[in-house]
Image: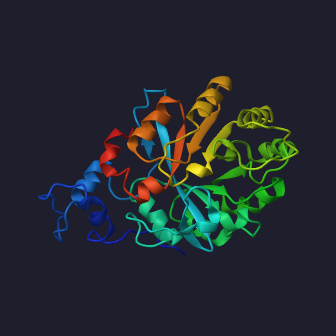
Amino acid sequence: MVQRGYPPWGCRFALLAARFLPPDSVCPGNGDRGTAWLLASLGQGIGGGNRTWGNPGAKGRAMKLIAAMDLLQGQVVRGVGGRRENYRPVVSRLASSAHPIIVAQAFQSLGIDDLYVADLDALAGCDPCIDIFHEIKELGCKLWLDAGAKDLESLRFLEPVKPCQLIAGYETWSDPRGLAPALAEFSHRLTFSLDLRNGQPMVRHAGWDCETPWEIVEKAASMGVRQFLVLDVARVGMGAGLGSLELCSRLKGQFPGIQVFAGGGVKSAQDLSLAQAAGVDGVVMASALHDLSIHPSDFSALG
């Protein structure tokens, strides 16, 4: 059983805060700089939460923040440009190791409980790492599981991890006709991921009979999908900004009532503001959190 807990006051959180704090900011009890400031800037004590960005009135509601974890051989790896053969265990300024539990707790220390977990071994055809999913979920996290689902049966295999959000990714979901029965069974718990590389579909599936990203999402919407994730893997870890906002905005305008999330390329708080202005419901990010290019002082804008 995984015990929910956090490192000592003098450990990760003071280190996280120290870069951004005035020199006279002192943590009670051990003299470490900045921990008290960090808690104040978060607006809540250490622990989980559902982080959102911005003023809910700006586009009708606030935008959800989702932290990403790419798992490979039981460790969290650093995604860079979608070149998975080059992924290595993450070296983070936020988390003290690449162990999934340590990384998940580090994200929780920022108030982020929504975790998008991509099982890269499962995406390559291996069995999903169900045990790790359970351990992360026991921390109180809401999981968004991308484990190489290709049909209804592979989604059912993940059902014991519930409650969780299940990802049907275009990369592995070769037949759009399978979306209707999956939606009938999992309803709002199913998210369709449009997997792109440099703005184009990662793969070509004959069953989809689609050439462009828009044709793919249009067909998915016609099958009843009401929740989309638009993810450009070539931008992951590159800090180049979200390249899919125009497509996301078009989706929101064409299909009222759907939810659209975006990922790949977030570097700064400005990227979050641009995403909210485009009407995006949530953003998936990892490198910006590990590198502290989005840090607690930015959270003053959180809703």
* Pick the front one: 222 or 120: 120
Q: Position of residue 74 (x, y in %)?
A: 60, 74
Relative to 132, residue 61 above or below: above
Instruction: Give the position of the N terminus as an image quadrant.
Output: bottom right
Q: Position of residue 262 (x, y in %)?
A: 57, 42
Instruction: Give the position of the C terminus as an image quadrant.
Output: top left
Relative to 229, residue 258 above or below: above
On the rendered structure, is 55 left or right of 188?
A: left
Say which residue appears at 16% left-offset and 62% top-offset: 26
Relative to 126, residue 146 above or below: above
Q: Is residue 1 visible?
A: yes
* Pick the front one: 112 or 72: 72
Q: How many marks?
A: 0
Q: Is residue 48 visible?
A: no
Q: How is the image coloured?
A: rainbow
* Pick the front one: 104 or 238: 238
On the rendered structure, is 167 left or right of 292?
A: right
Say which residue appears at 67% left-offset and 24% top-offset: 254
Q: Position of residue 158 (x, y in %)?
A: 72, 61
Say which residue appears at 13% left-offset and 59% top-offset: 23
